[in-house]
Every structure is written in structure tokens, then in C-alpha cells.
Image (cartoon, rainbow, N blue to C red):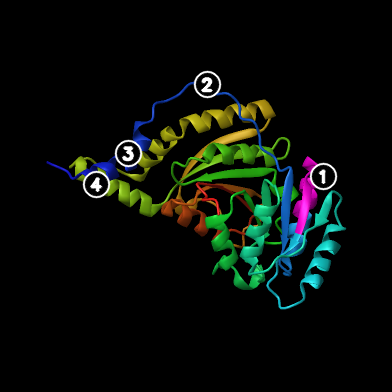
Amino acid sequence: MDQSPDLDRDVDDSMRMFERAKVGSATPMTPIRPSRVILVLDGSPQDATSIETAKTLREEFNTETLVLDARDAAEPIDAATEDAIQAARQMSGARAIARGEGEAFEVILQALRTHDVNMVIVPCPFGRSFERVGTDSVGTVMDVLLSRCPVPILVTRREDQVFQTCRGRVLLMAGSECDVESRAAAWAFGLASPGAEVSLNLIVEKEHFENVRSILEAIRPGETFDVDKLSDALAQSHTQLHAAMNATAREMKMSYALIPQAGELAPPHPLSDSTQQLLVMPLEVDDRFIQGFVNDRLRRSPHPLLIVPGHVIAE
């Protein structure tokens, strides 16, 4: 049966995961660690959690911290700057930077253009109580940053999730192939504490499964296709990343596991979950499926998340 060029391209894109050849042993990754970060304050109770996170980075990696009070409150800029200075004084290796003009997301993005940093720490939801908003929204600030932020975003969430403790269990969450997965994995190992548990969680979302199944049933009539087959194929498509992460874990004396799992069973679990863990997520900002995957995980997570972006268009 003849097929249109558009369908051929769709099939090729959807079948990439099935066509990857297996690879042998891999070279360990070079972990990536924060050297200079912007700590964004929003005037919410989450500021204390963000500050403690920045302190941990300073203690563990000698990270320099630039403190930015980006709240939208109608108060003089000088007052906001003074608040940032007070927060900075709680940490060594930190200094305050003045708030520019505009909305919070504009202020944050301008600071990122002005200062050379390799991470930004941002509370979510920005300027709102996490306990009051819950899973209903990540807020406008985070929506914009997920599309425009050029550096990894360390998102602080619920205050009982202590970053220092969360570093002992680090999960790299992948929903489909992504160009920045390897960089996200290097960040995962860079932030993990000595002897940490690190895993590559390959998530099969129901919508993704249904789309792939529809295509396969169209080109292979009569052949059955279930979620286990997609899980196996997804694991095979990530063989190279899996091998590299396994080698890195051995070299760094950490435990490692590859975990394919259905979307409804994958972390994060309900907000009542008290497990201390850090979720790491690669993000291609021009991929709508990955964008939705990351946004959904962020919205439902009580845990801190490191979002590692790619394909960000320079402003």
C-alpha cells in the first residue's frame, strides 16, 4: 500500500527507537557540577529552602552564588535589593545582584544574559505558597523559563525535601529520545552525593504508547503490540546512555539501575510522598511531547528537580 511522504517521515521518527544498534562497553561520563549559580528569591516561604540548597552547593562544590530578589511585589527596588543582600550574608561565596525592571521572568532572564553562570535556582510556584497551590499550576514564571532559560534550572519545591538528603537518590527521567540526555546524566552524577543511588527511569506514557501502536498497526496489520514491547524498545534505544551511566556509577562507586516503567507508576508520586530524592529531566524546548512531559512531572512533584534544557534560541 502506498504511503504519503508525511506518513513515511512520521513512521521514521517514531521508529528511531527500534532501529538503534546495541553498543558495547562505554567510557565513563565526566560529571558536571555547578560552579557559579544565580539564586532567585521570590519572597515566599520557599526562599528558606532555596537558600539552604545554595548553601549545600557552596559546601560541596565551592559554588559561587549570585543572589537575585526577583519578586513582583510593588516595593522599591532598593528594598528588594537589600533583602537579597541580607540573604547573601547568610552564605560564604555569595553576593547580591540588583533587580532590573520588568516582570519576574524578565528579570531572571536578563540576569542570566548579564552574568556567566551554569545554573539557576528557582522556587516553584514562583511567588506563591507551594502548600496552597499544590499540583494545580507551576506558574507563569516557570512556564516562561521552561521555554527560554539557557542554563539548567534547579527547582525547589516542598520545604521538607532537603536537597542535601535528596542527593542520595537521583533519578534521570526520560520519556523519549532527547539530544540533551547525556548532559542531563552528567549533571545527575555531578550533583549526586558519594555512594548515591542513581537510576535511568525510562517512562512510557500512555499517549506515547497509543501513538506508536497506531502507527505500527497501520504498517504491520495483524501484529500485536503491547506496552512491554515499547518498554523493551525504549531501553534498547537508550543502550548507549545506559552503558555510559553504568560505567560512570562503577567509577564513582555509586549504585545504578535501569528502570523502564509505565507513566502512571513513575515518580513523582502524590504530594504526600516523603521520599527524599532529586529528579533530573532533559528538556528540548522545541519538542512539544517532552515539554508536556517535563511540565507534568514538575507540576506533580514535591521533590526538587533539575531541568537541563537544550535547543534554546538565544535572545
The residue lying at 86 percent from left, 63 percent from top is 86
**Residue 270 visible in the snapshot:** no
Mark 1: amino acid: Glu
Q: Earlier in the sequence, mark 1 or mark 4?
A: 4
Which of labels 2 and 1 is toward the front? 1
| Foreground pick, 142 / 225 | 142
Q: Which residue is mark 1?
A: 59
Q: Which residue is mark 2?
A: 25
Q: Which residue is mark 4?
A: 6
Q: Which residue is mark 3?
A: 15
- Callout 2 crowding tier (Cα within 10 Å): few <14, some 14–19, many ≥20: few
Quote the CA–CA distance across marks 4 and 2.
37 Å
Which of labels 4 and 3 is toward the front? 4
Q: At numbered mark 3, what does the secondary structure look like: helix, strand or loop?
A: loop
Residue range highlighted in magenta: 53-67
| Foreground pick, 98 / 159 | 98
Q: Earlier in the sequence, mark 4 or mark 2?
A: 4
Label pair 3/1, CB-CB below 8 angstroms: no
Q: Quadrant of the N terminus?
A: top left
Q: At numbered mark 4, what does the secondary structure look like: helix, strand or loop?
A: helix
Quote the CA–CA distance across marks 1 and 4.
53 Å
Mark 4: amino acid: Asp
* Image coords of residue 286 (percent x, y): 45, 51
* Image coords of residue 205 (percent x, y): 41, 51
